[in-house]
Amino acid sequence: MTTTTHASAIAATGLRKSFGDKLVLGGIDLHVPAGSIFSLLGPNGAGKTTAVKILSTLITADAGDIRVGGHDLATDPQAIRAAIGVTGQFSAVDGLITGEENMLLMADLNHLSRREGRRVAAELLERFDLTDAAKKPASTYSGGMKRRLDIAMTLVGSPRIIFLDEPTTGLDPRARHTMWGIIRELVTGGVTVFLTTQYLEEADELADRIAVLNDGKIVAEGTAEELKRLIPGGHVRLRFTDPAAYQRAAVELREVTRDDEALALQIPSGGSQRELRSILDWLDASGVHADELTVHTPDLDDVFFALTGPAGAPDQPKENVR
């Protein structure tokens, strides 16, 4: 993960948005340090895309004080647009033209000279490993290649803040890991990344800070480790093949949850060395042999479901909310 700075790239206070009688964002606060990866994590329809659209000037908020790149969204949206790049849930790549032509089109839209546009396009195509495919129609690209081209197009204008709205949805695991490497590299170069995702592993892997959005409210915020500490449920699991050893351990160990079919015991534990040593010492002293010992500490899955409830649905292809 990256080392964050104290300067604020994005600051929003009291951000509200409704569509008709549907409240999508209920007065949320967001603070994103410059040069960091901030992840907005939430279930399907939580309002993540709406937040990105507001912060990137695509739609207006009903209320809120919002500054992006040091500029006030209400009074200077043009300055914000000049400082940001946006990669949405759905690719902006034109499949009817080549990858290179897509890049040159973006160079024109960013008012680069013809010579500068070609230089930037060539550099970015090489950086994203697309040089060999540059002359081919983008419709022939794989999903991962289209996503790389999409981000390359976003970078043509050298934005300092990039919004990535569920950038790896629909990608296979290999392409997803490639995209993670690209995102880390962006931040190493000083760019701030605002990432929305439904993939819990993605937020855990990438984000310096994570905000969990549910029903239009920020229900928790912090580093991945801070969020994990919010949730109880850590335990040690002992599995036995000898029924007699299982029965003895089940009787003598305190506060265990039994699984008689699997011959397994679950013991509440925070996973500390002291707690593990205590269990191992008891097993050694009692002459009881456990065939398998595993430690489970709360992960972002536990955090997600504890904070968003059983109706939360990570890993879905898109949001229902606009």
Image (tube, grey):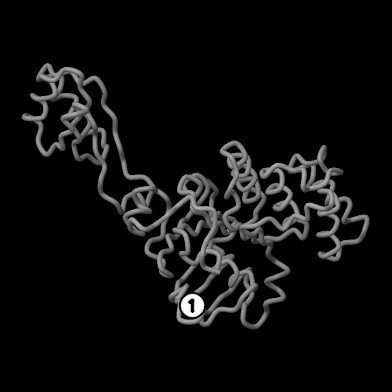
Q: Residue at x 47, y 73 (%)?
A: 24
Q: Position of residue 241 (x, y in %)?
A: 20, 19
User: What is the secondary structure assignment of the residue under circle 1?
Assistant: strand
Horizontal side of 8 relative to 127 (left or right) equals: left
Q: Nearer the viewer, residue 316 or 210?
A: 316
Q: Position of residue 312 (x, y in %)?
A: 39, 57
Q: Nearer the viewer, residue 159 or 33?
A: 159
Q: Quadrant of residue 265?
A: top left
Q: Residue at x 59, y 70 (%)?
A: 55
Say which residue label 1 marks.
Answer: 16
Q: Does 2 sit above or below residue 279?
A: below
Q: Nearer the viewer, residue 116 or 97?
A: 97
Q: Position of residue 258 (x, y in %)?
A: 15, 34
Horizontal side of 36 relative to 295 (left or right) equals: right
Q: Position of residue 54 (x, y in %)?
A: 58, 72
Q: Residue at x 35, y 52 (%)?
A: 303
Q: Residues within 10 Å of mark 1 (few under 14, many from 20)?
A: many
Q: What amino acid does circle 1 point to? A: Arg
